[in-house]
C-alpha cells in the first residue's frame, strides 16, 4: 500500500536517511549510465518513504525529472502516480518546508527546544559557537563537547558527496545526540562511555519526525551564520 506524505512530520529521520542512502546510489548509477541499476536504486529510495512501489509505472511519458525538480513539483490530489513523481514529490516537500516557522515556535530563551517521547531536549547556542572559536578558558567538559561535535561533523562531511557544492551541514544521528540534550545534561568524559551514550541517544533520535530535524538543522545553521557575522 502506497502512503504519500504531505508533510515532513510524517517521515522519521531514520527513514529519510535510508532514502538518502539509496538516492546517492541512484545518482552514482546515473553518472555511470547504468540505467537499470539507477531505476532499482530510485525505487528502493522511494519505497523507504511511501511503501512498495514495484507495481507502479516507473515514469510517465512526457515527464522531465530534472525540470520537475527545478519547478518544485509536488503531487496534486488525484493526479496519476509514478515512482519518479513520488521521488520528486518527496525531495520538493523536504526542500520547500518552512524551517523558519518551525524553529521559531521552538525557540525558548535563545535555545532551541524539542519535545520528544515525554522528554525535552535543547540546543545550547553557546556550545555551537564555542565549536567555531577558541577552546581557551572553557572547562574540560565543554572542550569534550566541542571536540565530539567537531569529530562527528567531519565524519559526516567525509561520508557525504556534496552534489550542490554549497556550504551545507548534514546532521548525523550522533551529531543530533551531541547537539540536543536535556537541560544540564553533560556528555561523559571517557570516550567509551561517551560513545555508548551517543549511540543510545542516536537510536532514540532515529524516530524524530523530519520537521523537527529540519528545524534543528536550520537553528544550527542560524547560530553558525550569526557567529560568523561577529567576526566580520
Image: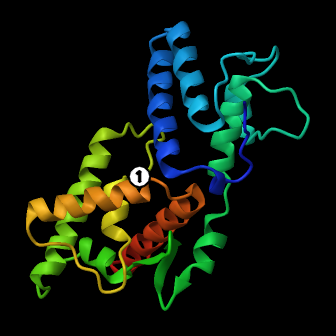
Q: Which residue is the site of mark 1?
A: 170
Residue at 63% x, 79% y: name it.
Answer: 105
Residue at 50% x, 11% y: name it.
Answer: 37
- State which quarter of the image contains the N terminus: top right
The answer to which of 87 and 11 lies nearer the viewer is 11
The answer to whether residue 55 is above or below residue 151 is: above
Left or right of residue 172, residue 33 in this image = right
Q: Position of residue 17 (x, y in %)?
A: 46, 42
* Crowding at mark 1 (Cα within 10 Å: few <14, some 14-19, many 20+): few
Residue 176 appearing in the image: yes
Left or right of residue 131, residue 180 in this image = right
The answer to whether residue 25 is above or below residue 69 is: above
Residue at 61% x, 78% y: name it.
Answer: 104
Q: Position of residue 45 (x, y in %)?
A: 55, 30
Q: Position of residue 63 (x, y in %)?
A: 78, 21
Residue 135 appearing in the image: no
**In what element is the residue under mark 1?**
loop
Amino acid at each position: 500500500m502506497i502512503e504519500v506524505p504531505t508533510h515532513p512530520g510524517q517521515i522519521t529521520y531514520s527513514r529519510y536517511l535510508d532514502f538518502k542512502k539509496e538516492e546517492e546510489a541512484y545518482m552514482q548509477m546515473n553518472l555511470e549510465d547504468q540505467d537499470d541499476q539507477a531505476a532499482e536504486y530510485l525505487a528502493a529510495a522511494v519505497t523507504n518513504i511511501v511503501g512498495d512501489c514495484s507495481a507502479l509505472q516507473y515514469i510517465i511519458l512526457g515527464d522531465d525529472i530534472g525540470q520537475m525538480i527545478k519547478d518544485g513539483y509536488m503531487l496534486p490530489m488525484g493526479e496519476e502516480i509514478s515512482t519518479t513523481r513520488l521521488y520528486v514529490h518527496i525531495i520538493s516537500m523536504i526542500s520547500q518546508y518552512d524551517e523558519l516557522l518551525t524553529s521559531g515556535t521552538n525557540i525558548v530563551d535563545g535555545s532551541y527546544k524539542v519535545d520528544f517521547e515525554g522528554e525535552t531536549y535543547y540546543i545550547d547556542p553557546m556550545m555551537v559557537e564555542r565549536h567555531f572559536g577558541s577552546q581557551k578558558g572553557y572547562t574540560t567538559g565543554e572542550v569534550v563537547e566541542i571536540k565530539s561535535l567537531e569529530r562527528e561533523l567531519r565524519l559526516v562531511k567525509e561520508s557525504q558527496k556534496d552534489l550542490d557544492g554549497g556550504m551545507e551541514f548534514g546532521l548525523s544521528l550522533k551529531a543530533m545526540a551531541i547537539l540536543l540534550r536535556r537541560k544540564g545534561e553533560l556528555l561523559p568524559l571517557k570516550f567509551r562511555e561517551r560513545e555508548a551514550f551517543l549511540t543510545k541517544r542516536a537510536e532514540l533520535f532515529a524516530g524524530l519526525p523530519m520537521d523537527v530535524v529540519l528545524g534543528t538543522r536550520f537553528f544550527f545553521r542560524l547560530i553558525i551564520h550569526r557567529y560568523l557575522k561577529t567576526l566580520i
